[in-house]
Image: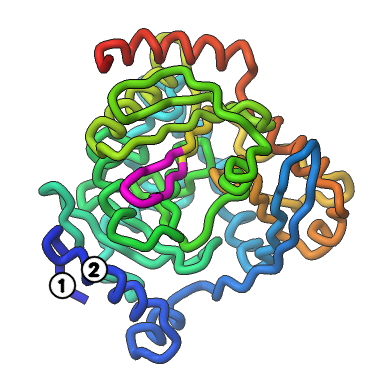
Amino acid sequence: MNNTLTNPLKNNLPDLIDSTFGQTSERAQTVRQAMGYQFSPKSKSVEFNGLWLEVVLNRARYDYVRSTMEKTRQSQQTELQSHTDPTKRSLRPHMPPPGRAVCQFCDLESSPLFITRLVLRDKNYGLVVNARPWGHRNFMLVTEDPDPQAMSRENLRNSFELIGMLSSDYEGIFTGVQAGASVYHFHLQIHRGSAAIWKNLELMNVRLEPIFSASDLTVSHVEGWPACVFAFEGSNLESLAEVVSCMIETFAKGANDFPYNLGFRREGRVIRLLLFPRTGEEQPPCMMGHPDSWGRFGFLELGGSVFLLTPEAYEAIGESGKEIYEAIAKMSISSLERTKLIAEFQRSASHLL
């Protein structure tokens, strides 16, 4: 498909997504044939410590996760040593993913999964279906330029604009380097659905502790969740992108070196975003007796929707979500590191007041 969507044509995007993921169109049939598998999950809810958590079985992704994680383990040390500043994991430059000679996102239009080109604020992107989905209607926003897998202010602002073109039941997700990303070319994941943490916020199972406010935007720490998470809310896309970028920059400032995941949704004119700074570990210890319980933890897992890869592990999770809760907690930075980040962010963002 060679058409290009620009801002004046944004109303065409929902129809284009419908035709891509529909059941009867010729385009949808071509996409399904090119995908590695169809997303057909099994899920259940569990509770622990007053929180609602979700367990999802996605057995079809098992082989892909094992393969990419093994390639990452084999090449990670070599890649880090070749980087000019190996300690800054979130600042790794664009490069082919482990085990590949070239980056598969540098030539999107030749893929049968390519949806369209999209121009946002004079920057060129491609939309492409995820060949190995982990969500319903899972597609990606990918830069045409070989940009690194790091969330810049420009890409964040444009990502907000994209989510505004879709209905409010879509969620945008960014996965940073050493935070679950398997491709090191800028891409934002989009899917129809949402992480469990949003429901906990709605039910007030957790509470927001404000740490910064300016004009129509607020920044809070989410108290009561097993991992450190910051919440942002605002309707001015430029201002929101600037303040979120200010927080992300603190993750690699000075001696800091925190990979991160973020996810966001639209509610009317307001964008709500959650940002997880994390340790450099991508996979928590697996459940006892189930060595392949799960793969990398990304935004969904840190947000309480944990994907399991084997039926045995899925069945082993009973009514209590204790194992899920503890796995999320193991990926989090410490409370002392959180306190330090908040202070650094408040100093950096003071010019926005």
| Amino acid type, residue under disc 1 in the picture | Asn
Q: Tell me how far mark 1 sits from mark 2, CA to CA.
A: 6 Å
69 or 42: which is nearer to us? 42
Instruction: Identify the magenta region.
Output: 263-273
Q: Is residue 36 above or below residue 168?
A: below
Residue 63 in picture, x, y percent from top left: 63, 63
Q: Quadrant of the C terminus?
A: top left
- Name the residue: 21% across, 53% down: 144
Specify which label sits upstream in the sequence, 1 or 2: 1
- Name the residue: 27% across, 28% down: 242
Q: Is residue 148 above or below residue 99?
A: above
* Residue 338 in the figure: left or right of residue 170: right
Can you see residue 78?
no
SS for callout 1 = loop
Task: Please give the residue where the numbered disc 2 appears in the rendered image.
Answer: 116
Q: Is residue 311 above or below residue 253?
A: below
Most common secondary structure along the magenta stretch:
strand
The reply to whether the magenta stretch includes residue 318 is: no
47 or 32: which is nearer to us? 47
Can you see residue 124?
yes
Figure quadrant of residue 246: top left
Residue 5 in picture, x, y percent from top left: 17, 65
SS for callout 2 = strand
Q: Residue 87 has which mark?
A: none
The reply to whether the magenta stretch includes residue 270 is: yes
Task: Please give the residue where the numbered disc 1 appears in the rendered image.
Answer: 3
* Residue 20 in the figure: left or right of residue 132: left
Q: How dense is the environment of label 2, judged by Cα within 10 Å: few (below 14), some, or many (20 and up)?
A: many
| Amino acid type, residue under disc 2 in the picture | Thr
